Image: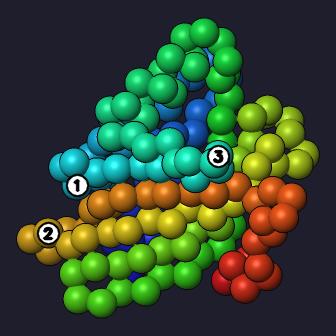
Amino acid sequence: MQDIDEITQALYQSVSFKKGTRPDLQRLKTLFYEGGKLANCNGNLPQEFSVQQFIDVVEGRMKTGNLVFFQEREVASRTEIFGKIAQRFSTYEAFLEEDGAEPAATGINSIQFIQVEGCWYVYSMVWNDQAEGRIIPAKYFEP
């Protein structure tokens, strides 16, 4: 499971950045298997992205100044592995301000991994933020 832990950590690191710096979005590409998908499930319908489309959205928001700082970190996780597939429920906190005492969002990334030639890759990732009427159960905050 160490490889999956390392990939998950790299995933969070690749999208996080401080003011005046840039996220390592090229690294993000290396973590996904070819054709990997992402989906934001916070709205009525999921917003689906290829890895490149996701990168384009992040870069666009940075270019317009709508995104100048972003830190996301895993606070708990549950991973299950069977053969060459794995599923991780990764509870996260996301911050949009460097001195933010409270996270701008808390939620769960559901990350699906596949193993190819002995290496783990992210195959897909879907996420949902906690919201009114959608509270994360306590078991997803346990180590």
Residue 97: x and y in percent read: 79, 32
Mark 2–mark 3 distance (CA, rounded to whole Å): 33 Å
The answer to whether 36 is drawn above or below residue 137 in the figure is: above
Residue in the image at 34% along x and 40% along y: 51
Identity, as a three-letter code, of the amino acid under mark 1: Tyr
> Which residue is tagged 3?
43
- For the C terminus, which image quadrant? bottom right
Determine whether the residue tagged by mark 2 lies in a helix, strand or loop: strand
Foreground disc of the pair 2, 3: 3
Q: Nearer the viewer, residue 136 or 6?
A: 136
| Dot 3 and dot 1 residues touching (CB under 8 Å) | no
Mark 2 sits on what residue?
116
Q: Earlier in the sequence, mark 2 or mark 3?
A: 3
Circle 2 packing at 10 Å, graded few (<14), some (14-19), many (20+), is: few
- From this viewpoint, is residue 27 visible? no
Instruction: Identify the residue at image location x=36%, y=58%.
Output: 124
- Mark 1: give few (<14), some (14-19) or many (20+) Cα within 10 Å: some
Under mark 2, the amino acid is: Val
In this orientation, does residue 110 appear? yes
Q: Residue at x 48, y 81 (%)?
A: 79
Q: In the figure, 63 relative to 31: above or below?
A: above
| Disc 3 to disc 1, C-alpha distance | 26 Å
Q: Amino acid at mark 3?
A: Gly
Q: Describe residue 59's horizontal placement relative to residue 100 as left or right.
A: left
Residue occupied by mark 1: 33
